[in-house]
Image (tube, helix red, strand yellow):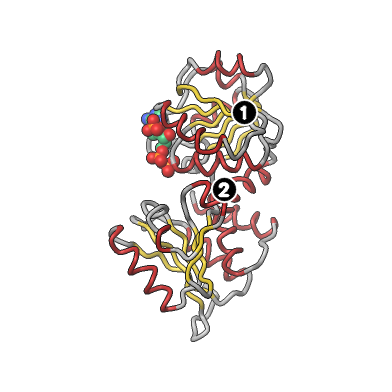
Amino acid sequence: MAVELNTKTKLAGLIGHPVGHSVSPYLQNTLADKYDINMAYLAFDVASDGDIYNVINGAKSLGAIGFNVTVPYKKSVMPFLAGIDETAKKIGAVNTMKLKSDGYHGYNTDMPGFCRALDYAGITVSGKNVVLIGAGGAANAVLCGLLEKKTETILILNRTVEKADALAERFRDSYKDTKIYTAKLDGSCIPVMDKISSDKWTAIQCTSVGMSPEIDKAPIEENAFYERLDAAFDIIFNPRETLFLKKAREHGAATANGLGMLLFQGIRSFEIWNDINVDDGIAAEMLAGMDQAMD
Ligand code: ATR
């Protein structure tokens, strides 16, 4: 790391449990290096929810400029923040905190990170049909991004359909221009898709199915599903090409994995802390570095 630590070094970090495999320290310290910002970013493994109050107040006293927040604390930090931005409120989760004069303010950069990753991959969703697979935390931020991008129709598919219904319900009132449907995640969703639209669909995969080491699994097996796609995005990045993406590609769809989303959520946090814009050239260099590091 080229940043020389001294009395002016600003502290940032990650709060989560576990944090041992996080790429955020690599990502943030590389960005600090590229932009010549005197910031050091460390991973803090916080043992339990009961520690969050002390962590936030101690960090505030130390003047740490900001934190990323990961599983399992994206909700539990919220009561201790001085403010929460609208996007994080809608999603109901904070993954970034920034120190201001009255304390830490909360943001969600998964949503803008997803949107920029889609743009970067050249996948357009505005005015289109999107099938969103999954209804957990990641799907929540992705749904918000799709709605902000003015997707015409969204069909949320989930193994537990009640969770898809609850997710749709959270957002329906705030985004009346998009039609949101829900269905069970299995072959029975295909006639549902055909009934809604005969146009092609973009699929966004937000479950953990197909993640290493379970690389021979896909959230939906039927070829008929993949025939209906012209683009597919998987939030998983390990393996680089999940079975879901492979099937989509073999049926002629454009594909992108989750490495871009991982990068761009981190970039957005870095931008918030340092009040700068990270350009696509730097992002491309970073993405190539992260991709290489996976070998
Ligand atoms: P995350 O924060 O990563 O989204 P999560 O909130 O636990 O994690 O959500 C996991 C998602 O993956 C859910 O949509 C879950 O489906 P259920 O709501 O039915 O549990 C989905 N998921 C996990 N394992 C799955 C499997 N074997 N088959 C289908 N869906 C699965």
Front in this rendered view, residue 262 or 294: 262
Front in this rendered view, residue 13 or 140: 140
Number of the label disc, if any, that sits on residue 274: none
Number of the label disc, if any, that sits on residue 179: 1
Task: Give the side of residue 237 with respect to residue 117, left or right.
Answer: left
Q: Position of residue 87 (x, y in %)?
A: 56, 51
Q: In this view, does 287 lie above or below 38?
A: above
Q: Is residue 147 above or below residue 75?
A: above
Residue 212 seen: no
**Furthest-front residue in this view:** 173
State the separation of the CA atoms marked 2 and 1: 19 Å
Instruction: Indicate the amino acid at tag 1.
Output: Lys
Residue at x 64% of width, y 32% of height: 178
The residue tagged 2 is: 111
Q: Where is residue 205 in the image (x, y as percent from the top left)?
A: 52, 34
Residue at x 36% of width, y 52% of height: 72
Quarter of the picture for ligand 1? Answer: top left
Q: Is mark 1 within 8 Å of ligand 1?
A: no
Upstream in sequence: badge 2 or badge 1: 2
Residue 67 seen: yes
Q: In this view, does 178 lie above or below 105?
A: above
Q: Tell me the mark number nearer the camera, choosing from 2 and 1.
A: 1
Q: How many numbered discs, if any?
A: 2
